[in-house]
Image (cartoon, rainbow, N blue to C red):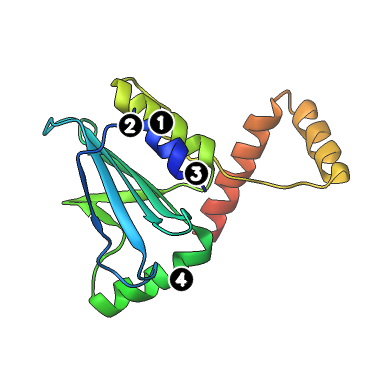
Amino acid sequence: MITVKEWMELVDYRITEGSAYGWQCYGADAYMLDSWNGEQDGHSFTIIFDTKTQAVYEAQAHDYVHNRAYRMINEDFRKKNKKEARRRAVNRDEAWDDVDYVDLDVDDDFIQKALAIRAGEDYDTRVLMPIDFSDEELLTYMKMAHERDMTFNAFVEQALREAIKANG
């Protein structure tokens, strides 16, 4: 999970709002900071963290230009967040009207998207996924990719797409 320091650097230390976080899923010391560029068709970023421990619970990036929203939720608190959303009858996946959050698991994926959003640049909308292979598996899959005259990344991406499609 990204840190408060990393988030502050992403927003160039520009804070536009802040308040205690209103839900209980992150505890009594949860606080929320926002950084909005002031443009209706611009961008904003949000971080929810613990004021005592500095643990980050959630980070969000909102790209109003392209109607895209990204977020990372601390793995240790995903179930609590989901449970409270159900209790409150809130669609936790909806960022704003007809725009759902895309959940990210890789810090660098969030950081790269956020930097591009802030700069008004195009960015890769695909989602990076952490995948762990044993050395033996890695060698086997690299050989399979080579046999198909594909890069390893393209091979893994194709395999993941096929697995997702098969499991609907």
Above or below residue 149? Residue 54 is: below
Proximity of marks 1 and 2: CB atoms separated by less than 8 Å: yes
- The residue lying at 83 percent from left, 45 percent from top is 137
Q: CA distance from mark 1 to mark 2?
A: 6 Å
- Rendered location of residue 121, percent (x, y): 33, 20
Q: CA distance from mark 3 to mark 2?
A: 15 Å
Instruction: Judge left or right: residue 100 versus residue 158.
Output: left
Instruction: Name the residue furthest left.
Output: 40
Q: Which residue is mark 3?
A: 2
Q: CA distance from mark 4 to mark 1?
A: 28 Å
Proximity of marks 2 and 4: CB atoms separated by less than 8 Å: no
Query: Amino acid type of disc 3?
Result: Ile
Proximity of marks 3 and 2: CB atoms separated by less than 8 Å: no
Mark 4 / mark 1, whichever is N-terminal: 1
How many labels, in total? 4
Q: Is residue 63 visible?
A: no
Above or below residue 149? Residue 157 is: below
- Rendered location of residue 116, percent (x, y): 37, 25
Q: Which residue is mark 2?
A: 13
Mark 3 / mark 1, whichever is N-terminal: 3
- The residue lying at 35 percent from left, 62 percent from top is 30
Q: Is residue 111 visible?
A: yes
- Rendered location of residue 49, percent (x, y): 39, 55
Q: Which residue is mark 4?
A: 79
- Label drawn at residue 9: 1
Viewer-proximal residue, 50 or 132? 50
Query: Amino acid type of disc 2?
Result: Tyr
User: Considering the numbered disc 1 on the image, is that residue within a helix, a strand or a loop?
Assistant: helix
Viewer-side label of 2, 4: 2
Q: Residues within 10 Å of mark 2 (few under 14, many from 20)?
A: few
On the image, which quarter does residue 21 sit in?
A: bottom left
Q: CA distance from mark 3 to mark 4?
A: 19 Å
